[in-house]
Image (spheres, coloured by chain):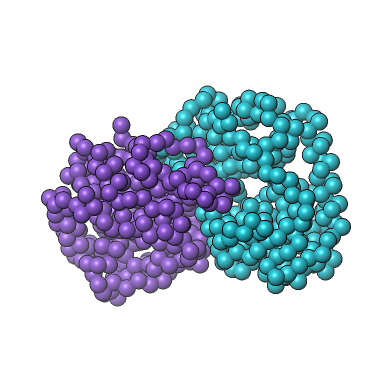
Chain colours: A cyan, B purple
Amino acid sequence: MNSIVINLAGDETELASSDRGLAYGDGVFETILVHNGKPVWWDEHWQRFMRGAEVLGIRAPDETIVWNACKQLLLNSDRCVLKIILTRGSGGRGYAIPDNQDPRIIISLHPAPASILEAVNLRWCETRLACQPQLAGMKHLNRLEQVLARNEWQDENVFDGLMCDTEANVVCATSANVFVKIGGRWLTPKMDRAGIAGIARAWVLKQWSQVQEAHLSRLQIDQAEAVFVCNAVRGILAVKRLGDREYPVNGDIADLQNRLAKEQAAFAMGEHSGS
Amino acid sequence: MNSIVINLAGDETELASSDRGLAYGDGVFETILVHNGKPVWWDEHWQRFMRGAEVLGIRAPDETIVWNACKQLLLNSDRCVLKIILTRGSGGRGYAIPDNQDPRIIISLHPAPASILEAVNLRWCETRLACQPQLAGMKHLNRLEQVLARNEWQDENVFDGLMCDTEANVVCATSANVFVKIGGRWLTPKMDRAGIAGIARAWVLKQWSQVQEAHLSRLQIDQAEAVFVCNAVRGILAVKRLGDREYPVNGDIADLQNRLAKEQAAFAMGEHSGS
C-alpha cells in the first residue's frame, strides 16, 4: 500500500470520480523528498500548501492529521518521494463551490529518482506559459502546459526544458526553477506571472541573499556565465548545456550543492517540528 | 449507479489516485444534454472531444465503445446531463507521458438544471483568463480560472459572470459563450487565445452565417443592443442585465430559441449516428 486518501478528519476515504481535483484541477499539491525516512523541508512545503489552499478557498486540513497519515505511510521507507494532493472534494454545481466543502487529501509514495551528480543538459521548449498573476507561483493541479512542454522531447540526455511565458520572459524548467549568473551576479526569474515558486528556489534565495529576482529574456540566459536548475526532489543541478550553448563548471554551484547536502543530512538526523 | 469508469477496451475499471487527470488535469471533457434519453449534438461533442485528445496526444477511444457505455448508463434516463471525461490514465515519470498510455474514460449522469425561460442577469468577473493560444477553445481539465471566477458571487439571481482575458478582451461567461448585437450585427468573441469554443456557440454560428467572430472590449459589450449566452446544456439564454446595464427584449434571440427547441425535439425522435 503506497497511497492513501483521507478526509479532513483524517479518516480513510476513497477518491470519487466526481472529485473536483479531477474535474477542474481544483486543488494543490506538494512533492517532497524523503531522506532517511524524513520529509525534507516539511515546514516550507506545508506553508506553500496552505497558501495555495487559501488562494483557492479550499478548507485547510490540520497539519498534525496529514503529518500522521504521511508518517504511517512512510514506515519502513528510507529514501523516496512523498506526494500530497489537496482537492476541494466532490460537490458544488458546476464550477460553483459547495457550501459544505469536504476536501480530500491524497498521499502517495514514489521511488526517488537516481541522484544526478554531473551537470545536466537542458533545451528550450516551444510551449509557452500563459501569464496568470492570480495563480502564479502556486503549485496547483492545472499543469497541462508542463505536460505539453515536457513531451516536446524524448532524448533521455536532455534533463529538462526551459519555458518562456507568452510575453517572452524566461520562467522556469518544466519541473525546476532556474538560476543564472550574469555579469558576476546570480539572478532568477520572478514568479509573479507564471511558474511555480519552488521550495528549493526559496532555499537558494535564503542562502544567497544577494540573488536578484528579475524578468529575464532568452538572450540573457544564452549570454549567462553559469546556469543551474533546482527543485525539492532533485536538489541543485548544474547545467552543462542549454540548446547550443555550453556553460563552464562554476564554483558557486558546487558550494551550494555542498550546503544542501549538509542540510539534508541534518534533516535526516533531527526530528521534525510538524510531528 | 450513475457513473462508470472504463478503459480503451471498454472494460470497467477504477479511477486511480495516480490518474494524470487528477495530477495535472491531463485530459478533456464534454458535458452533454440528454433529451428524451438521447444525447443532443453527440457528433459535435464527440468531434471536439477527439480534437482535444489529439492536441494533448492522448490515445483516442473508439466512439462505439464509449457510446455503448453511455447508452448503458442512460437506460431509464429521460432528461439529464451526461458528462464524459477522458484522461491519459496513470503512469509516466512526472509530466512525461508514459510509453504505453492506458487512458481512462469517466462517464457520469447528473440531473439536468431546471429550464430557464426568462432573460438572465450577468455580472462582470474580476478573475481574468490567461492567454494561451495552444489550449484556447479546448474543453480540457484545467479549469481553475473558471472556479475562481464563478465563486466571486453568491447571489442566486446572477446566472453567470462574463470574463475578460489578461489583455482585456471579453471572452465568455464562466460556463457559457456570449453573443452581442452591435450596430445591427451579431458578434461573438474569438476563441483563439482563451475560453472554450462551445458546441451551442458552433450551432449558432451555423444558423447565423453572418455572425462575426471578433475581439471585443468590455465597452463594446456595454454599448450592445442585445446580448445572449449559450451552452449545450442550457441552450440560448437572453441577457436582461449585465452589471448596471439593461438590455431590451430582442426578437432575434427568441427566433434562435425556437429553432433550437425544434432541433432538440428532432434529436429526441431520431436515432443517433454514433450508435
**Residue B96 percent coordinates (x, y):** 56, 52
Locate residue A18: give its quadrant.
Answer: top left
Give the answer, above or below, for where A59 lies relative to B254: above
**Residue A29 percent coordinates (x, y):** 58, 42
Give the answer, above or below, for where A74 lies relative to B30: above
**Residue B36 percent coordinates (x, y):** 17, 44
Give the answer, above or below, for where A274 lies relative to A142: above
Q: How many numbered marks does the figure carry? A: 0
Q: Is A185 or A119 nearer to us in this picture?
A: A119
Residue appearing at x 40%, y 65% in the figure: B191
Is residue A230 shown left or right of residue B114?
right
Q: Is B186 or A237 nearer to us in this picture?
A: A237
Task: Confirm whether residue A152 shows in the render.
Answer: yes
Residue appearing at x 53%, y 49% in the figure: B98
**Residue A194 percent coordinates (x, y):** 60, 58
Is residue A13 shown left or right of residue A237?
left
